[in-house]
Image (cartoon, rainbow, N blue to C red):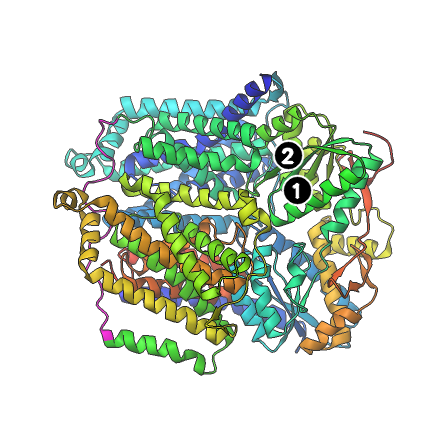
Amino acid sequence: MSSWFDYTINGLIIGNVYALVAVGLALIFGVSRLINFAQGSIYLVGAYIGWVAVVRLHTPLPLTIIVVAAAAALVGLVIERFGLRPLQNSVRIAPLLATIGISFVLDQLVMLTFSPNPRALPSQLPDVRFQLGGGTIGPLDLLIAGVGITSALLLFVFLRYSKLGWAVRAASQDRDAAMQMGVDVNRVNQAVFGIAAALGGVSGMLVGMYYNQIDTAMSLQATLKGVVAEVVGGAGNVPGAVIGSLLLGLVESYGVAVFGTSYRNLFAFLLLVVVLVLRPNGLFISPRQAPPEPLTGTFIAPSRPLRIPRWALAVAGAIFAVLPLFPVSFYVLQTLINAWLLGMLALSLTLVAGTMGQVSLGHAALLAIGAYTSALLSLTLNVPVGLAIIGGGLMSAALGTLLISPSFRLRGHYVSIATLAIGEIVALVILNWESVTRGPIGISGIPPLTLFGYDLISPSSVYWFSLAVMVVLALLQGRLLTSHLGRSFRAIRDDDIAARAYGLSLNRYKSLAFIFGGFAAGVSGGIAAHLYSYINHETFNTQQSILALTVVILGGLGNVVGAIVGSVALVGLPEVFRIAAEYRILIYGIVLLLLVRFRPQGLLGTI
Amino acid sequence: MSNIDRRTLVKGSLAAMMAGTAFSRAALAQSAEPILLGVSGPLTGPNAQYGAQWKQGFDLALDEIHAAGGINGRKLAYQFEDSQSDPRQSVAIAQKFVSDPRIVMELGDFSSPASMAASPIYQRGGLVQFGFTNSHPDFTKGGDFMWSTSVSQADEQPLLASYAVRRLGLKKLAVLHLNTDWGRTSRDHFVKAAKEYGAEIAVTEGYIAEERDFRSTLVRVRDASPDGLILISYYSDGALIARQARQVGLKQTICAASSVYSPKFLELGGEAVEDVHLGTRYFPQDPRPEVRKFIEGFKAKYNGQEPDAFNAYSYDAMNMAAAVVKIGGTDRRAIRDAFAKVKDVSSVIFGQATFDVESRRVKGAMNAELVVRKGQFTLWDGKPT
């Protein structure tokens, strides 16, 4: 019995830690309907500023907190002014992508300034421990809880009773109406970003002290858990975010208690999916409230796509097809093979995200399903590689559609979060289902690509194979988009209520899109498995999903040619910047930000 | 609009090129035509810290090699390509190295998915892939161009088990391990050896690399009532577990794998890692001449910083590469054959390293039984803690 008390206490302690990030995310979401993927980076910046203050300047704790809050708030204001405000009249997806780019840049800047080695951040509180159940808690636990709950309460009071708070809420309900009533929306946004960033910075510092450890990898994890907690509590609801965080902590802790440590995150993400499916607005938002997403499709930019004449496409295709006949280095071919493989994934995502409006953040899971299916089919059942890859595509289509189907009723950002969770769940199942997937050891000795009995091992033959598969998929998808089916997809994206009124069954069309998209992604994963000869649960990770989404937005949502151009660009750019060594991801992030700023509808425009 | 795109792109690549010229000029200054090794490893991304540690070890070894006259008068240099431990990038790097005639052999990558995805390309391209941190049991099965000086876990874990069970007298163990290919393989070897030595395994818990909160895991461990905790961890997570173990009131002896051996472990763990036992390949007061040379050279080069396990791996790897190139010259096949010929290379990890031609690995790692006392790694004096 006493153990359950300890598990409860431990769950609440870690929930406390999540709450610090979740409150900042909720505040920003409440006003700008934006999931701020840079919140984790501000948290990281706060931790390192805290380190400078404590270790170098020897500031006392109250001063440290003020310094960190002020510096982080400044970072937040800069992000708002230069990163997000220029995008406020552009599409809804642009700020989301901008926050991803900003987080790249901030993380890299911290890494370059402080080196990637973890550092100790000593706590400045007296080292007394209070016995509680079987374990102990320290003053820092209480301080973290205090900061989390106080800030949530303060924000609640601020939003409800102060004039600026009213302005914030007015702006969040209807920006245009608020502006007509004389609310300075920019000032509101500024205030919100400043407060959220100050909170994020302080929480990074406190969590760093709590673990006596800060490193540059803490940013993404903080964002992930914060987003989960925030959505569970009800996106945009500040007290809800605190309760959501505590609930998340408890679920994880009990998950560990019952099933063991390696299942921990599985429970976190399952909780998220269950909450999203049962109460899409989160636990603490009344169903009566107006849906947080607009009913019509302003999420995706209406724009005139750049029409590329057919002959130009044919010429480009021909040039790439004959490329291996010329003396180009195998390195260039390998880079293009990577681009074609990413291109297949991007085709899949541009269909579900662009054409269908279901922005998926867990697309790498489809790669993983295809890769594991194909690898296992060829290794254990001796299925010929060509057939195994098709099997991988089919499995990915079937399983992917099945997994995503409960979230078909969700809209906008909630789809993205559900798919993010499903992606994590797939990776964790692969890690834990050892009898089939061989767990963390992974699958080695996967046979190389063969087709009709011929081994495809030279770079040129792999190049031709992957190019051919991608072109076939692209042509099929192009045909699909101009058909009745493609028009129905876009109708659902642009106005699902009108589409339904017109007699379109949403679930059936969404399933069809995911089946086709799942197949393309699964084939890409299958080819990758045979190319690499070794895969494990880390091969297809969240970064892949985010990269695929970046490609799709860069190319233009729903745009088939754009997806391919985007893949070549985003595989090619980091390789071109390779000469810049440690700086290359920083440069990549900056280029990404500039693209979002100046061409939010993508290079080739949305179809 | 598209004008601006082009302009920004041009600006970006100009900045990149300028950064690049500064970089390559520094490399060229050493010698007109050095023998070039390719290194594929993480300089950015989640494993960036290990890439940075590799560089320190490489650079120290290179200084010593050049002070001793280089490779038959020629200098040795390396070209470090950042893979972010991502298999997609490591395969591109592999093609880059294979098609670059100046590269005579390759070192790395760090993680198994990144390294083993690139193996087929190195094998077919006939370029040695020298994976000096690749403990995955299947790594050298990729082909006869795959060689590794990573200590096989089949060798290391029985040593740790012997320390914990036979020397420290622990009888009922809780094993916490990183749930990666390395952690799992290590755990399996450890559990097997510990059982052979007569200990009981009370519980094993695998955790993912990003995990920071272990309190609930440790309650599970407590309920299994072990008399010792075994950490198959790296230094950052090892320090976190030790701290939280003390916070939840676990007072059992902690015994850790050699990968926690780093000054960072002491810094991050603070008082909580006091009395933690660990088996290592070398230690600060080690009298062996190659270790003295390594530690003193390292401290002199890096402002008194203590080297850690990853520094030692990369230092050894560069020395091994130099010894191999001395025999094999610059021909890629001859270099592969030289791995089988090279004998008794002075090594921090192995003392004297000679490859087992069958497994293409080195056997017989050195072993030292350490304990943390007064915030320092010291040789265990046999006294119970």
Classify mark 2: helix, strand or loop.
Answer: helix
Q: Nearer the viewer, residue B1 or A310?
A: A310
The relative height of residue A72 versus residue B118 in the rendered view (above or below) is above
Residue A59 picture quarter: top right
Which mark is first along the chain, 2 or 1?
A: 1
* Magenta stretch: dominant secondary structure: loop
The chain carrying label 2 is B
**Residue at far left of view:** A502
**Residue type beneath disc 2:** Ile
- Residue at 34%, 27% (x, y): give it: A283
Q: Which mark is residue B233?
A: 1
The reply to whether callout 1 and callout 2 are in contact (CB within 8 Å) is: yes
Q: Nearer the viewer, residue A443 or B329?
A: A443
The stretch of residues the image draws in magenta is: A287-310
Residue B123 picture quarter: bottom right
The relative height of residue A70 versus residue B189 in the rendered view (above or below) is above
Q: Residue A199: within the magenta?
A: no
- Residue at 49%, 70% (x, y): give it: A450
Residue A245 position, x and y percent, is: 43, 29
The residue wearing badge 2 is B241
Quarter of the rendering occupied by the N terminus of chain A: top right
Residue B318 position, x and y percent, is: 72, 64
